[in-house]
Structure formats: structure tokens, C-alpha cells
Amino acid sequence: MSFFRVVLTDHTRAVKHWYKEVLGFYNPLSKEFKLKDLDKIKWYLSNWVQLSPRVEKLVKLNNISL
């Protein structure tokens, strides 16, 4: 079963080996997409974080306002 974590990581590091924080998850079988703490994610986005293209698409598809 496929299950993906949405993580905060430095772009210079490999995601599989190191990440700072798990921000949410995505289950492609059930199409379930959840983010843990929207306020914290909004803070990250206002300071120095960019969403990956895939996560940005999932946010738009699920009508999550960030």
C-alpha cells in the first residue's frame, strides 16, 4: 500500500535520509490528504519555505487555503 509523508526538508539534503518535520500525509489509494498544523505551515511559507509542485497541486485540489 502506498502512503506518502509531507515533510519539511532542506533542498540540499536527500529526503529519504533527513528531514526536519513531518507536516502531513497523502494516501493515493483513498485520495486522503491531510496537513497537521496549518498555522505552522503558513508561518513556514511566509518565511522561507516553498511547496513542491506535487504538494502545491494537492493543496489546490483539496481547497486548503495557505
Image (cartoon, grey):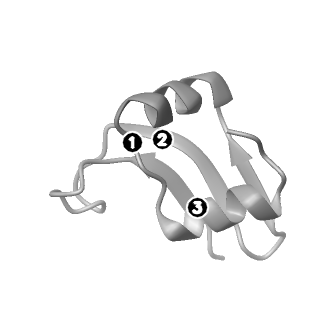
In 3D space, how far apart are the residues under numbered discs 2 and 1 (Cα atoms)?
14 Å
Say which mark, if any, is on residue 22: 2
Name the residue rendered at 34%, 36% in the picture: 48
Q: Depth check: give the residue in front, 2 or 64.
A: 64
Q: Nearer the viewer, residue 36 or 59?
A: 59
Comparing labels 3 and 2, the label whose residue is closer to the camera: 3
**Residue that protrudes farthest toward the left in the picture:** 12
The answer to whether marks 3 and 2 mark residues whose Cβ atoms lie closer than 8 Å is no
Q: Is residue 38 visible?
A: yes
At 63% from the left and 23% from the top, the residue drawn is: 39
Read off the residue under disc 3: 55
Question: Residue 7 appears at what percent x and percent y?
Answer: 44, 48
Q: Where 28 falls versus 36 (above or below)? A: below
Q: Secondary structure at mark 2?
A: strand
Q: Amino acid at mark 1?
A: Val
Q: Residue at x 63, y 53 (%)?
A: 25
Please tell me the numbered disc located at residue 15. none
Indicate which disc, 3 or 1, sits on the residue closer to the N terminus. Answer: 1
Point out residue 3 in the picture as x, y percentages from the top left corner. 61, 66
Q: Is residue 13 left or right of residue 43?
A: left
